[in-house]
Amino acid sequence: MDREQDEMQFLGFFGILKESSKIIYSWRKIFSQITFTLILPLSFIFLIHIELSDLIFNKIHHNKSQISETQSGTPRYEKLSDMITSEWITFWLFKMVYFTFLLIFSLLSTSAVVYTIACIYTAKEVTFKKVISVVPKVWKRLMLTFLCTFAAFFAYNLITLVVIILCKITIEENGKISGNIIVLVIIAIFYLIGFVYLTLVWQLASVVTVLEDCYGVKAMKKSKELIKGKTVLSIAIFFMLHVSFILIRVLFKKVVVNGWKLGSVDRTAYAILCFLMLSGLYLFGLVLQTVLYFVCKSYHHENIDKSALADQLEAYRGQYVPLTAKEVQMEQYQV
């Protein structure tokens, strides 16, 4: 990161992509180590989850088809019923294990990448050993921020569900089906906008949690303030990353999970390709989030004191003692 702080605010969509690519290339050794240790397992967990979920769900679907053709009360019916119950239990237990490991490796990867870029920014010596020693301490703060974000998403979804139910009841009483559809479409549009915004706040709050002396709700509030003025840019990056993610997922589902017409060699080759592309996308996305943080800070004319930030990064290596906001940064500078 060779740019001065006041220059970062002028980076647009392609400028951030270029800056992120330059950071990864210039420090490819340590990012490769982080990828092999944390991001590759994260990608593997996600892809194997798709494969195994499909396998279990197909078994459930097959047994449901069998039980629908079996007379109730017979030994075969009871056996199939027990199998379906057991498979559903297996399915949801697998989902719980999957989400647990996905969350752990996702937060660890975020901690490692953001901490590494912060060290690069402050010109501190950064080694893989140092990063790994720091990650568990940063991870605890990120978990608290995630829990607050999860609560926000839960409340948001609950409120949306209540609104949908109330609207549906009101419209059905009037007997206007066309009006029902229009209202649901409008609600869906507003829900998507809110969901994207909450996701942007969460992603930037993760970076704030690592680089500043706040976490949880305070990090979310800080993230919300930083996004102002760069909302369109943040949304563009969000859609670029998520469209790429969806395309990789669809490709894996189509040619690996359901690609029975392809040979095992071709399916294995596609699986490896999806695995590598997803790993690269995870890394690139985390770097993009961190660069976007510095762009937003620069846009709001918040000067980050490199020496104070370096002290905070160093504090992670010992017992963490949060610095005050004044110590970490963030004095207004005149342009």
Image (spheres, rainbow, N blue to C red):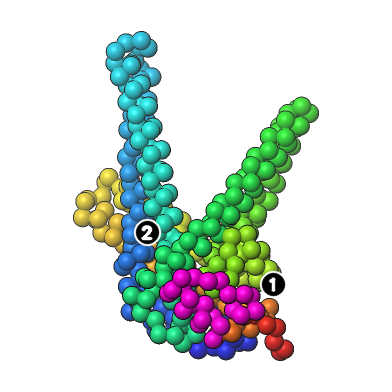
Q: Is residue 113 visible?
A: no
Q: Image point 76% across, 32% down: which residue? A: 170
Tell us which disc is closer to us: 2 or 1.
2
Mark 1 closeness class: few <14, some 14–19, many ≥20 residues within 10 Å: few
Residue 317 sits inside the magenta stretch: yes
Instruction: Say which mark, if any, is on residue 229.
Output: 1
Q: Residue furthest right?
A: 174
Mark 1 belongs to which amino acid? Gly
Q: Image point 78% across, 28% down: which residue? A: 174
- Left or right: 45, with 243 as reference point: left
Question: Which is nearer the eye, 9 or 305?
Answer: 305
Question: Which is nearer the eye, 36 or 260?
Answer: 36
CA separation in Å, label 2 and label 1 = 33 Å
At mark 1, the secondary structure is loop
Q: Residue 149, percent across and down?
A: 58, 55
Mark 2 belongs to which amino acid? Leu
Going from N to C along the chain, the mark reached first, 2 or 1, is 2
**Region rendered in magenta:** 307-328
Locate residue 131: give its quadrant.
bottom left
Residue 2 sits inside the magenta stretch: no
Locate residue 335: give its quadrant.
bottom right
Q: Is residue 321 visible?
A: yes
Q: Image point 45% across, 83% down: which residue? A: 120
Instruction: Say which mark, if any, is on residue 42.
Output: 2
* Vertical position of residue 88 compared to residue 96: above or below: above
